[in-house]
Image (cartoon, rainbow, N blue to C red):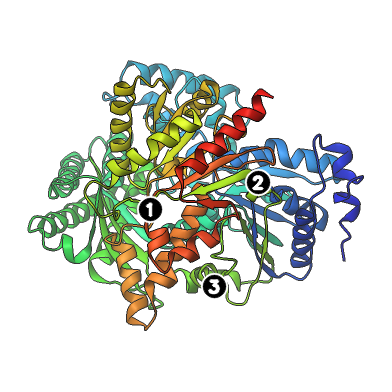
Amino acid sequence: MLDLNPVFASDGLLSKHIPGYRMRSQQQEMAQAIAETIEKNGLLVAEAGTGTGKTFAYLVPALLAGGKVIISTGTKTLQDQLFNKDIPSVRKALNVPVTVALLKGRANYICHYHLERSLQDNHLTFINRDEIKYLQLIERYAMRSKDGDKSGLSAVPENAMIWHHVTATRENCLGSECPDYKKCFLMEARKNALAADVVVVNHHLFFADVMLRDEGLTELLPACNTVIFDEAHQLPETASLFFGESVSTGQLLDLAQDCQIETIQSAQDCIALPDAIAAMEKAAKDLRLSVEDENVRFALPVIERNKAFKPALNQLIEKLSDLAAILETQAERSEGLENCWRRAHDHIGLIKRWCNSGQDEEGADYVRWVEVYSRVLQLNATPLSIAEIFSRQLNASPRAWIFTSATLSVKQNFDHYLNEMGLGEAQSVCWDSPFNYPEQALLYVPTGLPEPSHRDYIDSVVNAALPVLKASRGRAFVLCTSLRAMQRVHDQLREAFTAENITYPLLLQGDGSRSHMLKRFRELENAILIGSHSFWEGIDVRGEALSLVIIDKLPFAPPDDPVLSARIDKINRDGGNAFMEYQLPHAVISLKQGAGRLIRDETDRGVLMICDPRLTTKSYGRRIWQSLPPMKRTRQLADVEQFFLTENQSAVS
Ligand code: SF4
């Protein structure tokens, strides 16, 4: 058995090499449990409270164990931090000759083939002057870059449309047929990943490419001895996304555009092609226009009541089939035309499957639903449960699986997570945060608020929040459960601040990128940031700049969401209690994430204000607050004022 004491002890290797390292018994215990799991190819679900040091707790055994390890994170930011900072530090401290590779999704690497096509194509008339300038920058960057990672070219904004034209998707990548295959950045990154001892990926890439075995990555998972998921609370959602199927009118418009380019390049004499492309393009646009609303989701029975939808979908299938038939006759003329034909064919299959069945070949049930954005309509089929699909993958061959996050359990009970992910009898352990929560934090639930369904609820939240924001002198996050509530809170606070001549800066989610807004928040030192889902997780603001977190209401997912409502129906139909077994645990885990923004290290102090009266009036409320870290609790505003006063006085003295 690997003895980790020489690494984690107060005079051990980490303490000698990592500035600011402090020994924490929770961290060492967690590392030991992970080492044992790796040794016996086991399954461990580990909740580690904020400040436990879970990253080092899994990196040390992973780097010492030998064998190939995949580490998957929730975000690209954490992926970069692991690759650039944490892994090099631990590797140096342990002095182990471990090779490490960073692998991102396809959309992050410049594609020589599509870049060349875009440079040659004078049909990209829709791109503006900025985009043309960006295209030239990308061309020069592709010539000098070693890895083709678009994050290395900050002169082109991450969300610029041009990236779409110079990167490849799984559909339009030519793979080994590609004339640029030998110098392809993506293939090079994958080759490095296959050769490395430790590969750092993110959950989207893991499910899209590793688990579903994309071309060029087929050997990665089979060769791997250990898989570690950090931020594992995000996995059920990511897995649902990738174990499902979807096809969007946006993909069909992309196909139409690629068909046009390929026709010009290789099939100008095929007179029927341009008309067939135009007809399919129009049918795709008409399908989107058959639904008037935008940014909404419809369950199948609801969308079927829309009289225009089905005829538009049938028309699309017809026009797509016509196009596929013509492409088939031209496919031999170039790799690009063959790729277009294959995509048209695959899309027809997807749409027909969506129309005809709510089950896959193995009989698993799927929820069919439609999502409508401003320009695009997407047909989705999402598995009702991912448990069976995921557990099949787990059992495919022996290896260790580790799932870790600060938020996986409800009152230290993991049943919900284990059931949802199909993890059966996995060992599950909680390591509490080493922070002194009763001293550092106060949970405040105001009195007198109406039920959240009341039409004046948000206004009451703002009224209750105002004196607290004055007491904290700004320095607050207001986390809302919907964009509408977020906007209302912002407008109401601005009005109240103007009336009372209060000058704390108000920042609203969407005013800039998340990282830019966080930078401003830290610099201002008395700001109030009002946000929705983007700010509930993955945010680390230490120190006094963030001393108050206000949560408008308990984060129950909207029950009219097509996938959620189908899952609720299924659990209730099977004799379960969907509220207690599914909705409540999900809300608790989200709430723990939001609340977790407050105390980030042992010197942080702050107030968590949860406005929702159900925390005290409903029987399940106790289960919710008992799942939070053990802060002192109060319902009195005076206690909150005293808390901040004490902080003030200690700052003065
Ligand atoms: S193999 Fe795919 S990603 Fe690579 S250059 Fe060719 S088309 Fe682009």
Circle 1 Cα neighbour tier, 10 Å, few/some/many (<14 / 14–19 / ≥20) = many
Tell me which numbered mark, 1 or 3, is placed earlier along the sequence.
3
- Give the quadrant of the N terminus: bottom right
Give coordinates of residue 321: x percent, y percent: 21, 56
Q: Is residue 495 above or below residue 177?
A: above
Q: Kindly tell me whether mark 2's CB lies below 8 Å from ligand 1.
A: no
Residue drawn 33% across and 74% down?
359
Which mark, residue 439?
2
Q: How far across and how far down the image is residue 278, in percent?
A: 17, 40
N-terminal of the pair, mark 2 or mark 1, is 2
Question: With 209 as the anchor, is 579 left or right in this view?
Answer: left
- Asked if one can make out residue 184 in the rendered structure from this viewpoint, the answer is no
| Cα separation between marks 1 and 3 | 26 Å
Dot 1 falls on a residue whose secondary structure is loop
Quarter of image, res 119: top left
Q: In whole angstroms, how far apart are the C-alphas of marks 2 and 1? A: 24 Å
Question: Badge 1 is on which residue?
Answer: 612
Please, what secondary structure does the residue beneath circle 2 have? helix
Q: Which residue is mark 3?
A: 415
Mark 3 vs mark 2: in front: 2
